Amino acid sequence: MNSTDFDFDLFFRSRYSRFLIHLASGGGTIASEVFSNPAHFALRKKLRSIPESLKLEYKLSPHIDEILANKARNFESQEFDRQAYLSDFIDFARCGCFSFDRTYLGKSTDRQYHLVAYPVFRRSYENIVDIVGGEVIYGLRRHSDPGILNSFIDKSVRKPFWNGNVWLIGKHLVTHIHNNDEEIHIASSLE
């Protein structure tokens, strides 16, 4: 099986805070050890089983209008449906994931991703963790008020890091610090 023939839902756990990250592969080249790992399908199934009453609020990337304008240009021969495009990303965000899409779909070897939607955390997130397994996010353990974590996230997603500056290298998500070209490992594929 070739990863470029499919749009896989892949899941990663951030290195320090334990955030759950969803990537839509968009027909990109993905290491076989990543896309063939059954942990991705199993987690997707668990996320899809979360009752509506437990799902979280979500926010769209502050860069989403710019991103979608670029994507719409690639759909010149057909109409671009914003709501249809956003629906899966929103659903994964409502299940507690930071949901990313591949930035340049026309080139399967491009490994660049951008944030589409992200969760607004509340205490009930712990119930989602019980369903999908894993760990409660570090910030929700440390702070009694999820608003503190949400405020930090809202400030963070405005940085260029979230707007197409994330790359999938093997089974790791990385970003680059622009001023010194240092590669920073931010998340790993589920094992």
Image (cartoon, helix red, strand yellow):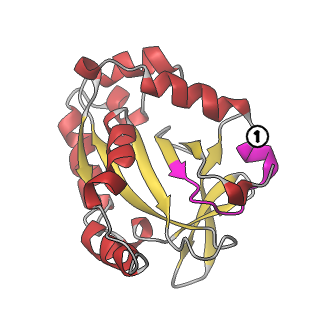
> Does 160 lie within the magenta span?
no
The correct choice, above or below, for 152 with respect to 126 in the image is: below
> Does 28 lie within the magenta span?
yes
**Residue 170 screen position, x and y as percent:** 75, 57
**Residue 157 screen position, x and y as percent:** 32, 61
Is residue 34 shown left or right of residue 184? Answer: right
**Residue 109 screen position, x and y as percent:** 70, 72
Is residue 169 shown left or right of residue 10? Answer: right
Q: Residues within 10 Å of mark 1 (few under 14, many from 20)?
A: some
Q: On the image, which quarter does residue 131 sit in? A: top left
Residues drawn in magenta: 23-35
Q: Please give the residue where the numbered disc 1 appears in the rendered image.
A: 36
Nearest the eye: 46 or 145: 46
Residue at position x 39%, y 44% from top?
A: 88
**Residue 113 screen position, x and y as percent:** 51, 65
Is residue 65 shown left or right of residue 111? Answer: left
Q: How many marks?
A: 1
Residue at position x 59%, y 55% from top?
A: 25
Residue at position x 65%, y 63% from top?
A: 28
The correct choice, above or below, for 79 with respect to 189 in the image is: below
- Which quadrant, please, contains the C terminus? top right
Is residue 170 shown left or right of residue 82? Answer: right
Q: On the image, which quarter does residue 67 sit in? A: bottom left
Please identify the residue farthest to the bottom as the structure is shown. Answer: 179
Please identify the residue farthest to the front as the structure is shown. Answer: 77
Residue at position x 36%, y 36% from top?
A: 139
Q: On the image, which quarter does residue 158 sit in? A: bottom left
